[in-house]
Image (cartoon, grey):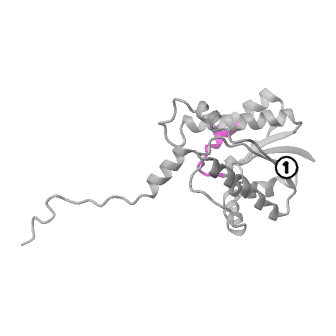
Amino acid sequence: MKKILLHSCCAPCSGAVLERLATDFRITIYYYNPNIDTPLEFMRRAEELEKLTKLGIDFDVVTEEYRPDEYNAAVRGLESLGEGSQRCYECYKLRLGKTADYAARHGYDFFTTTLSVSPHKKVAWIHEIGRELERATGVRYLDEDFKKRDGYRRSLELSRTLKLYRQNYCGCKYSKAEAERRSQPMPSTTHANCNAHKP
């Protein structure tokens, strides 16, 4: 079977992708995510990958060191931009670039990422970057949109079945701040003259 290096952002996004790839590839999960906001969060997500062995799929895991300086350098000057902006593009580019480089140095036939299973990620950008890296490294990029064919729904099912830790933000401190703002209740509106017509 062909060997594929699968960049994984987290366990919940990886389960359905592992199921889809297992019939055609020997899979190695590549956990490289310097965008994650704290060392604790980084390790918690890395450790959750072990629960995916319950799927009965044979795979290896390579976990890179936590190096947030690499992410900070990649998005410098873009910190004030929102989710889905150029900041996210540079984050995809950083993580896929490291994945493609590792795949080239270790003799993999293909590389890809679990990022496309999320409905919040821009798949066109991910595939654009992946194809550019294929041309640069000679390692084929598997340009599949893993959310299709019920991939996202299946990822939710597996998260519940395997009791995976499922976070409400992508990992970086900027997305966490946006998630926290969304979760805050809307302030009530009080009119200055609300008692004007009371006797």
Q: In this orientation, does residue 82 appear?
A: yes
Name which residue type carries label 1: Ile
Label 1 secondary element: strand
Q: What is the x, y in percent for residue 34?
A: 65, 40
Placement of 92 over or under 132, stated as above or below: below
Q: What is the x, y in percent for residue 37?
A: 58, 45
- Residue 125 magenta-highlighted: yes
- Residue 102 magenta-highlighted: no
Whether residue 23 sits left or right of residue 169 in the image: it is right
Q: Residue furthest bottom?
A: 199
When asked about the image quadrant of residue 149, the answer is bottom right
Q: What is the x, y in percent for residue 150?
A: 69, 59
**Residue visible at 73% across and 55% down in the picture:** 47
Look at the image and give the residue range highlighted in magenta: 118-127
Is 19 or 35 nearer to us in this picture?
Answer: 35
Is 68 or 97 nearer to us in this picture?
Answer: 68
Q: Residue furthest left?
A: 199
Q: Residue furthest top?
A: 136
When asked about the image quadrant of residue 76, the answer is top right
Residue at numbered disc 1:
27
Which part of the image, by quadrant, shows the C terminus? Answer: bottom left
Q: In this orientation, does residue 16 appear?
A: no
Q: Residue furthest front?
A: 40
Number of marks present in the image shown:
1
Q: Residues within 10 Å of mark 1 (few under 14, many from 20)?
A: many
Is 193 or 69 nearer to us in this picture?
Answer: 69
**Residue visible at 73% across and 66% down in the picture:** 162
**Residue visible at 67% across and 57% down in the picture:** 152
Placement of 93 over or under 33, stated as above or below: above
**Residue visible at 52% across and 44% down in the picture:** 174
Q: What is the x, y in percent for residue 49?
A: 75, 56
